[in-house]
Image: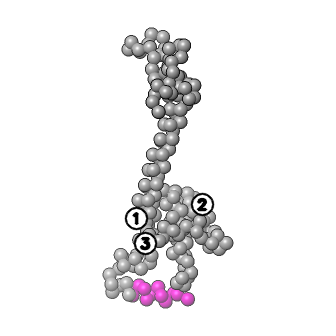
């Protein structure tokens, strides 16, 4: 839409928006400024458009940050689908995990972590993925890993077998 279609000149000589009716110009205080008597101002339509544009760019920046952090967090893209929205919320452990995330600031401040243990296939990684995805939405940097990766990074091959044997002695 062209500006002349949305702007008219009022009896005071100022331009007005035909849509919202607010002035698109205002007079400088008496004496003017550097020889000018009036200046531009935003009408309600302009302010709304500006706010929408700012919100769009802020949302875009948020989405890009979460996307970048998500790609760093997970080794497998399927983990991005491990969310509380997709989880069985009747499970007590899922509720504890959700409560942990809901109280993240307190948990972080008090250095409280989570430890999940149990046999293979019981959902430990899934719950950790749910926590990770929820924290990513809060713009928290997360890296999902597992015990084997940590052991591989820390110990040389010979020490790794001894460490895993020692830890396995405690498995029930």
What is the x, y in percent for residue 54?
Answer: 47, 41
What is the x, y in percent for residue 11?
Answer: 54, 13
Mark 1 Cα-neighbour bin, 10 Å: few <14, some 14–19, many ≥20: few
Q: In this orientation, which residue lies closer to the viewer: 145 or 76?
A: 76
Question: What residue do we see at 39% from left, 12% from top?
Answer: 35
Q: Give the quadrant of residue 163.
A: bottom left
Total marks shown come to 3
Question: What residue do we see at 53% from left, 13% from top?
Answer: 12
Q: Which residue is mark 3?
A: 76
Marks 1 and 2: in contact by CB < 8 Å? no
| Alpha carbon separation for disc pair 3 and 1 | 10 Å
Give the residues drawn in magenta, as a range.
162-172
Q: Is residue 147 magenta?
A: no
Q: Which residue is mark 1?
A: 72
Q: Earlier in the sequence, mark 2 or mark 1?
A: 1
Q: Is residue 89 above or below residue 108?
A: below
Marks 3 and 2: in contact by CB < 8 Å? no
Q: In this orientation, which residue lies closer to the viewer: 88 or 156?
A: 88
| Alpha carbon separation for disc pair 2 and 1 | 23 Å
Q: Which residue is mark 2?
A: 102
Marks 1 and 3: in contact by CB < 8 Å? no
Q: In the rendered image, is residue 107 in sight? A: no
Q: Quadrant of the C terminus?
A: bottom right
Tag in front: 2 or 3? 3
Q: In the rendered image, is residue 106 in sight? A: yes
Residue 37, numbered label: none
What is the x, y in percent for residue 84?
Answer: 58, 66
Q: In this orientation, which residue lies closer to the viewer: 37 or 167?
A: 37
């Amino acid at each position: 839409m062209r500006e002349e279609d949305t702007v008219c000149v009022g009896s005071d000589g100022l331009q007005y928006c035909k849509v919202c009716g607010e002035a698109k110009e205002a007079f400088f205080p008496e004496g003017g400024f550097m020889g000018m008597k009036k200046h531009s101002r935003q009408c309600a339509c302009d302010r709304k458009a500006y706010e929408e544009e700012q919100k769009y760019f802020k949302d875009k920046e948020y989405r890009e940050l979460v996307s970048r952090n998500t790609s760093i967090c997970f080794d497998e893209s399927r983990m991005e689908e491990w969310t509380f929205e997709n989880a069985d919320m009747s499970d007590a452990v899922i509720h504890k995990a959700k409560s942990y995330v809901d109280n993240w600031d307190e948990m972080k401040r008090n250095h409280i972590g989570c430890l999940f243990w149990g046999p293979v296939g019981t959902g430990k990684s899934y719950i950790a993925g749910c926590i990770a995805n929820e924290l990513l939405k809060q713009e928290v940097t997360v890296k999902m890993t597992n015990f084997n990766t940590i052991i591989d990074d820390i110990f040389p091959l010979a020490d790794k077998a001894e460490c895993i044997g020692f830890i396995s002695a405690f498995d029930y």
